[in-house]
């Protein structure tokens, strides 16, 4: 296994990939620049990487103020024809309607689109550029998520968080001085998204050992590099220094590049992301609070680490397979469970997307035996995991919520999220393992009893 991570003249790139796993590996065809002062010289970077002089710039009122206005000024001074698509409103939702708003602003002579923002603005621009077959570039205004490199867009449609195909940006640009101006919750979201990769790596190895998933050592190397870069610079990130902002955005980009390399989001998301998606979908369906995606992921990470503490300290030989079989839900019971625990319409979508939502007993028993065989190695794999208390300490320093309760989510909604989000995707996870061992409800009860102390 080999991969080169190259940092040269403010450019970050990946090259020379070799790996023995069964994924096809792509070298990302994307230019990535990270440099303090880049906002003032954006035209120089764009002219060397994007064809054409007519650009549609997509922003909201906040990103216009912090960056897009200066982007337009710099580009216009250097001979670019700039048109602004300003997405109005206090909060821009990633909806099909907003995508259409961007599409309506594209003119026949538009050469490329330029997203000036973070997650939502980038996802909407990506989707619009894909539908209109236009290339796009990104000027990121917050180190808040790992999706800048993505080939898909996360959108809300009919109350469900869905993934829509797009294409990757040709050019990513980041100025640490601009990133430092983002609201504190966005930095917390970025840290949550990076640190979630601790859980993703252990869950992915569980999935490889128990459910036959393909595990990629190249992605593991990139994720460990991202985790080390973020973890070793937490204090700088909290202080919003140039070094800290550079470390955080590099961590997010390195993690995000794994998706391009293996064309799958498996390297970047597991059940902690499912929990965050559930909070968002439930808030849309029933009202109430929902933290930003990255903060929700961070909260989901804390619960996942508590789950791992239970499994790695378990006497695996004490598992009573006959008792598990006796308590196992029938297929009809499991269907009723998913339909009642997910918001209206979501349970049906989950069952369509996840072909393993209900296992036969022989299938489940096979997984239990595989988990027993793997348990000693699993405990060693868990050595990379931080303590849940360490994650709480980091989030408290960022004045970010460390539990669902502190994020305004009630006990019933949290209980449902912890019980049903194991089924949101096919991919295996710690909560799936505990469920197939017949332990998930009691583990959830234990976490709920700790909620006030988190």
Image (tube, rainbow, N blue to C red):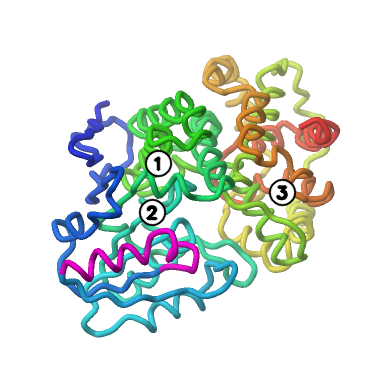
Quick check: marks 1 and 2 in contact, CB under 8 Å?
A: yes
Asked whether residue 59 appears in the rendered view, the answer is yes
Which percent across, then down, holds residue 353? 56, 58
Which of the image's four quarters has the N terminus? Answer: top left
Q: Residues within 10 Å of mark 3 (few under 14, many from 20)?
A: many
Mark 3 secondary-structure assignment: helix
Disc number lying in front (1 or 3): 1
Q: Nearer the viewer, residue 104 or 176?
A: 176
Q: CA distance from mark 1 to mark 2?
A: 9 Å
| Residue 56, horizontal then vertical, whole percent | 31, 74
Q: Which residue position holds label 1?
A: 249
Assess whether residue 117 is covered by the magenta stretch. Answer: no
Secondary-structure class at tag 1: helix
Nearer-the-camera pick, 230 or 154:
230
**Range of residues picked out in magenta:** 59-78
Q: In which quadrant of the rendered image does the C terminus lie?
A: top right
Magenta portion: prevailing SS class: helix
Residue hosting label 2? 140
Query: In terms of sequence position, does the residue under pointer 1 or pointer 3 come before the other?
Result: 1
Q: Residues within 10 Å of mark 1 (few under 14, many from 20)?
A: many
Disc 3 marks which residue?
Answer: 420
Q: Are marks 3 and 2 in contact (CB under 8 Å)?
A: no
Residue 391: quarter of image? top right
Q: CA distance from mark 1 to mark 3?
A: 32 Å
């Amino acid at each position: 296994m080999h991969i080169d991570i190259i940092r040269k003249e403010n450019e970050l790139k990946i090259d020379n990939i070799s790996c023995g796993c069964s994924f096809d590996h792509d070298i990302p065809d994307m230019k990535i620049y990270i440099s303090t002062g880049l906002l003032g010289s954006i035209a120089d970077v764009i002219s060397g990487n994007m064809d054409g002089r007519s650009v549609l710039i997509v922003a909201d009122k906040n990103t216009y103020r912090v960056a897009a206005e200066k982007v337009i000024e710099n580009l216009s001074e250097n001979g670019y024809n700039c048109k602004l698509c300003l997405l109005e409103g206090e909060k821009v939702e990633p909806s099909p309607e907003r995508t259409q708003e961007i599409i309506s602003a594209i003119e026949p002579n538009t050469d490329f689109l330029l997203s000036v923002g973070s997650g939502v603005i980038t996802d909407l621009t990506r989707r619009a550029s894909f539908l209109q077959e236009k290339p796009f570039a990104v000027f990121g205004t917050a180190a808040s998520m790992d999706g800048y490199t993505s080939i898909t867009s996360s959108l809300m449609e009919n109350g469900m968080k869905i993934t829509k195909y797009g294409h990757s940006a040709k050019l990513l640009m980041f100025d640490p001085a601009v990133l430092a101006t983002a609201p504190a919750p966005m930095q917390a979201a970025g840290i949550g998204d990076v640190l979630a990769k601790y859980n993703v790596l252990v869950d992915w190895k569980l999935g490889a050992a128990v459910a036959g998933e393909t595990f990629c050592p190249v992605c593991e190397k990139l994720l460990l590099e991202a985790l080390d870069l973020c973890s070793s610079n937490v204090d700088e990130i909290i202080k919003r220094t140039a070094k800290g902002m550079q470390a955080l955005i590099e961590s997010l980009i390195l993690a995000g590049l794994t998706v391009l390399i293996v064309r799958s989001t498996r390297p970047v998301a597991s059940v902690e992301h499912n929990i965050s998606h559930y909070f968002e979908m439930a808030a849309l369906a029933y009202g109430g609070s929902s933290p930003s995606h990255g903060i929700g992921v961070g909260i989901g990470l804390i619960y996942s680490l508590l789950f791992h503490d239970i499994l790695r300290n378990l006497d695996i030989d004490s598992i009573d397979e006959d008792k598990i079989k006796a308590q196992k839900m029938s297929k009809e019971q499991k269907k009723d469970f998913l339909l009642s625990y997910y918001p209206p319409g979501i349970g049906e979508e989950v069952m369509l997307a996840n072909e393993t939502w209900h296992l036969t007993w022989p299938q489940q028993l096979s997984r239990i035996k595989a988990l027993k065989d793997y348990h000693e190695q699993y405990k060693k794999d868990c050595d990379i995991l931080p303590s849940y208390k360490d994650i709480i300490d980091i989030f408290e320093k960022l004045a970010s919520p460390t539990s669902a309760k502190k994020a305004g989510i009630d006990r019933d909604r949290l209980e449902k999220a912890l019980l049903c989000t194991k089924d949101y995707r096919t991919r295996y996870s710690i909560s799936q393992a505990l469920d197939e061992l017949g332990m998930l409800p009691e583990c959830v009860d234990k976490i709920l009893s700790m909620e006030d102390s988190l």
